Image (spheres, rainbow, N blue to C red):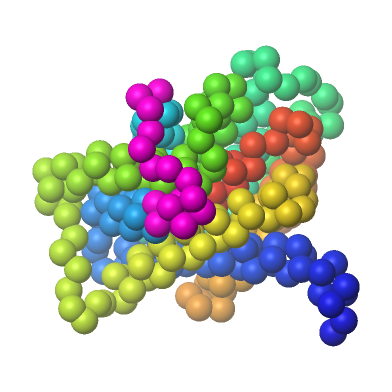
Amino acid sequence: MPLPVLARLGPFLALVAIGAAWGGTQPLSKIAVSEGYRHFGLIFWQTLLTGLLLAVITLLRGRRLWLTRRQWLTCAVIAVVGSVVPGIASYQAIAHLPSGVVSMLLSSVPMISLPIALALGQDSFRPVRLLGLVLGLTGVALLVLPEGGLRGDVSVFWVAVALVSSVCYAFEANIVARWGTAGLDPVQVLAGASLIGAAISLPLALGTGQFISPPWPLGAPDRALLASTLLHAGAYTGYVALVGLAGSVFAAQVSYLVTLFGVTWAMLFLGEGYSGWFWAALAVMLLGMALVQPRPKTLVPDVTLRQNATG
């Protein structure tokens, strides 16, 4: 293939690869909880490994790791709102819900972000975006109707727990959009937030008896957690590079691919099957997400997209 053609296709191929990698983290999270591992132990290892990997990447990029007090405070807020609390909710929910359902519910983040942005004065009201919000709520309703969207085994309670993650990510995105990242780039922020998340979750894991001592050789849940962490760190770094190469508006489209790949991988590797209710819910959720996308100048993709990769 001629080099100019490859150059033109490069951003699209990267978008697909990033979406496929990020979409794979939800089925891997399902495997990670399949043999009894609990949320605090999983969050500790996930945040520790992610933090260390991104710290190495930060150093290789020639960026510093020693942060100011304000920068550490920013990372701490993002650690709580963007890692620890949503991790608790999502790891518990995915133990009781199909992986594809959790992937689909994460597409509600832009719709939940909208009223928060309006309340903070960061965005303006437009009727078409209200329609998007209504479609998002309709998608959730279709999941919990009789027959539940997936052969009747979708619990209203666990759907609500899964949506706690979406609410957290929506607040995270608006916090960053409103107050910024104290001069840190996205990889620095996530590296710092992940390390703080590990420091928070370690005593919680030890105190609740949820600490995980990985066996050797590693079992399926351990391998799944490690693979999920590697995919997350790699996809996130690739995403940040893609923003610089092709712009945030183009790169933000990866959110659709993350959801679609999350559902696809769950079908292929976990054997999940879905009824018409689920596909209807997915269609209206994706349409709602398209309608509520913020204006290009208000996009904060480096935090609003990574929610699809956290377990």
Relative to the observer, which residue lies in front, 155 or 64?
64
Residue 270 or residue 72, whichever sits in front:
72
Residue located at (35% from left, 24% from top): 69
Horizontal and vertical percent position of residue 210: 17, 53
User: Which residue is drawn at the image coordinates 41% and 62% (left, top)?
Assistant: 229
Q: Residue at x 70, y 36 (%)?
A: 299
Q: Find residue 131 and report its horizontal and vertical position in percent.
A: 79, 33
- The magenta span reads 54-70
- In which image quadrant can residue 213 be found? bottom left
Quarter of the figure that contains the C terminus: bottom left
Any magenta on residue 64? yes
The x, y position of residue 221, in whole percent, is 31, 70
Q: Is residue 126 left or right of residue 145?
A: right
Residue placed furthest toward the bottom: 1
Q: Does residue 239 lie above or below 66 as drawn?
A: below
Front residue of 141/214: it is 214
Which residue is at a point 38% across and 27% down the rendered structure image?
A: 68
**Picture quadrant where residue 260 is located:** bottom right
Quadrant where the N terminus sits is bottom right
Q: Is residue 130 magenta?
A: no
| Res 149 visible | no
Horizontal relation, residue 63 to residue 253: left or right: left
Horizontal side, residue 1 vs residue 76: left or right: right
Q: Is residue 234 above or below residue 304?
A: below
